[in-house]
Image (cartoon, helix red, strand yellow):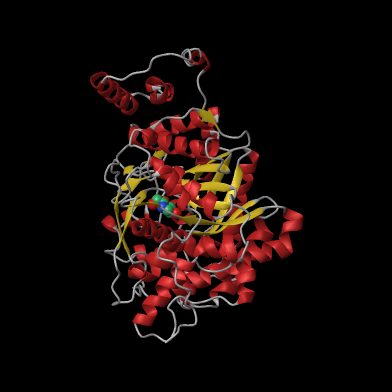
């Protein structure tokens, strides 16, 4: 049987994407090399920001006419979150807008990425139910930001689908494309005179896979081989339609930019010298990031690796057509190019290895023919499976550059969890930001990646989805046991303030004299023992010293 959607076989001897150069260039780096520190600064107009999302911070779950979202229903059902945590009150930002603005002003961020609660604006998901009080809240927020010279970056939909739309089938229902478009149209018309940076959907991969495949997040549908592909198909079309609406009706008068926030781990092959493992790493990236980025940023269609893998498995499963839906030529032309910049959420790195996936039950995960493990050399964090692997960010940015033709990139989310009891001393977060931002800097300065902005996740501790309030990503601590929800800056907030002020990590003036070159015929040598001592010393200082000292301790210079 020949399947209609099946792609031609990929030559077994090749890694299918151009982006293999990234593994060729970086994967042979020694452990020491990949930890080298780089001084430098970002471009003058670099956009430093922080993020939040509506359900995670707002509370006011039924205030002033807001309708329930799928997250309200999920968390209000006992047993779904640790200690039955809900977003009913969260950080109470619905009532504490001025406090949020105060923190943003104090950090001196250039931008604030937040999301709109769909069911606060349209309680039943559609325009006929428009709730003016919800609209007023966002007007106050946007105006407050602009009054403080902070650029609003608005995510239109960050997972909290109105329950009324879930009752109509949610994202498995093709009608959602028009319904979402109408909601976006309203947002552009209402806020677009002041909002110039839009992200339509946050992490469509999580919606499709976690929401409709694994079913770990709402709407909790466990149909791993079919639903994620249908949902992703609808999400991609919905995004494209909203983009065209902006183009057709608002771009000329408003002049903003529209994109979508995709997410990706960096994937290293288990053995970079084994072609099959490099192909597995590339497939992992294509199935996670390429699923959405390939249609939107490349050619309107899914990656060949996905078409081949899912088509092939479907054939072996005796299905009459691939479980991966296909786009018509007209749809491909419509989807291609529907983003003005590349927005990427990134947290960690995994190691991929080729494994032949099972045929039963049908599953997106098995379709990939690979397994993923943690990067065991890197420090663990307070969230399982999220090790801090800073060097992975540089590689991911380079992969995006190679794969999607050097787009302008916003790192739209990056950060680390600590236990919510951490009030002030979040030095692990300082270390995380310091090393990850430095890798973004290397990508920009050394590799020519067009990194335009960096958004630290998050402004403050908040409802952390399936982790409830056990951990927080915040630069500010929030006391959730106090009805006033007091916010306190952590060590990382101070650190980030200085990174923004310095626009990166410039080499301090008073130290420039320490850097230079020896005469041409200088005799370089090493002695094992002293080398080991230096290494140990450097590494210890790097981990232990406060940030200002950290910025000055450059292991490259010491050993060069
Ligand atoms: C990605 C989500 O977009 C964000 O809402 C969440 O806080 C972070 N992951 C951390 O889990």
What x and y, as percent, mark residue 69?
Answer: 45, 66
State the quadrant of the N terminus: bottom left
Give the residue drawn at x 38%, y 79%.
314
Q: Is residue 374 above or below residue 361?
A: above
Nearest to the observer: residue 309 or residue 125 = 309
Residue located farthest toward the left when viewing the structure as drawn: 529
Give the residue drawn at x 39%, y 59%.
279
Q: Is residue 502 above or below residue 208?
A: above
Q: Is residue 241 above or below residue 435?
A: below
Q: Which image quarter: residue 466? A: bottom left
Q: Is residue 112 left or right of residue 23?
A: right
What x and y, as percent, mark residue 305?
Answer: 45, 67
Give the residue drawn at x 69%, y 60%.
189
Give the residue drawn at x 29%, y 25%.
535
Q: Is residue 147 left or right of residue 93?
A: right
Q: Which image quarter: residue 555? A: top left
**Residue 504 visible in the snapshot:** no
How many numbered discs sit on the rendered protein? 0
Q: Which image quarter: residue 132? A: bottom right
């Amino acid at each position: 049987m020949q399947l209609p959607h099946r792609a031609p076989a990929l030559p077994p001897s090749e890694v299918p994407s151009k982006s293999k150069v990234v593994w060729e260039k970086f994967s042979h780096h020694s452990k020491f090399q990949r930890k080298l520190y780089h001084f430098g600064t970002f471009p003058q107009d670099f956009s430093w920001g922080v993020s939040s999302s509506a359900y995670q911070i707002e509370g006011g779950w039924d205030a002033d006419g807001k309708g329930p979202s799928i997250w309200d229903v999920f968390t209000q059902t006992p047993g779904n979150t640790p200690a039955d945590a809900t977003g009913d009150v969260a950080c109470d930002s619905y009532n504490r807008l001025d406090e949020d603005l105060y923190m943003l002003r104090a950090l001196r961020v250039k931008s604030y990425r937040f999301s709109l609660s769909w069911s606060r604006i349209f309680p039943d998901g559609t325009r006929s139910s428009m709730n003016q009080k919800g609209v007023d809240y966002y007007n106050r927020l946007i105006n407050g930001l602009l009054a403080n010279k902070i650029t609003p970056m608005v995510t239109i939909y960050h997972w909290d689908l109105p329950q009324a739309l879930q009752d109509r089938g949610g994202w498995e229902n093709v009608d959602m494309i028009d319904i979402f478009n109408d909601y976006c149209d309203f947002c552009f018309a209402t806020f677009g005179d002041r909002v110039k940076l839009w992200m339509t959907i946050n992490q469509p991969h999580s919606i499709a896979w976690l929401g409709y495949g694994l079913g770990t997040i709402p709407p909790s549908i466990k149909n791993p081989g079919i639903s994620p592909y249908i949902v992703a198909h609808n999400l991609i079309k919905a995004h494209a339609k909203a983009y065209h609406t902006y183009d057709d009706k608002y771009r000329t008068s408003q002049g903003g930019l529209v994109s979508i926030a995709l997410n990706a781990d960096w994937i290293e092959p288990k053995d970079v010298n084994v072609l099959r493992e490099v192909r597995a790493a590339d497939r992992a990236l294509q199935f996670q990031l390429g699923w959405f980025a390939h249609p939107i940023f490349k050619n309107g269609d899914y990656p060949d690796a996905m078409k081949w893998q899912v088509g092939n498995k479907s054939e072996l499963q005796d299905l009459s057509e691939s479980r991966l839906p296909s786009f018509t030529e007209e749809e491909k032309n419509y989807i291609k190019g529907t983003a003005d910049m590349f927005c990427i959420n990134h947290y960690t790195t995994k190691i991929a290895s080729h494994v032949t996936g099972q045929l039963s039950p049908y599953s997106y995960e098995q379709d990939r023919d690979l397994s993923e493990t943690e990067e065991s050399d890197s420090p663990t964090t307070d969230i399982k499976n999220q090790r801090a692997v800073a060097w992975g960010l540089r590689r991911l940015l380079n992969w995006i550059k190679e794969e999607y033709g050097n787009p302008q990139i916003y790192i739209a989310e990056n950060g680390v969890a600590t236990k919510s009891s951490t009030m002030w001393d979040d030095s692990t977060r300082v270390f995380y930001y310091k090393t990850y931002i430095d890798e973004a800097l290397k990508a920009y300065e050394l590799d020519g990646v067009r990194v335009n902005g960096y958004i630290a996740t998050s402004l403050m501790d908040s409802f952390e989805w399936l982790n409830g309030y056990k951990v927080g990503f915040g630069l500010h601590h929030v006391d959730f046991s106090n009805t006033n929800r007091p916010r306190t800056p952590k060590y990382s907030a101070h650190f980030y303030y200085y990174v923004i002020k310095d626009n990166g990590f410039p080499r301090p003036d008073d130290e420039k004299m320490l850097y230079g070159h020896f005469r041409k015929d200088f005799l370089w040598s090493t002695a094992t023992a002293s080398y080991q001592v230096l290494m140990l010393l450097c590494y210890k200082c790097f981990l232990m010293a406060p940030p200002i000292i950290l910025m000055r301790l450059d292991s490259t210079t010491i050993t060069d």
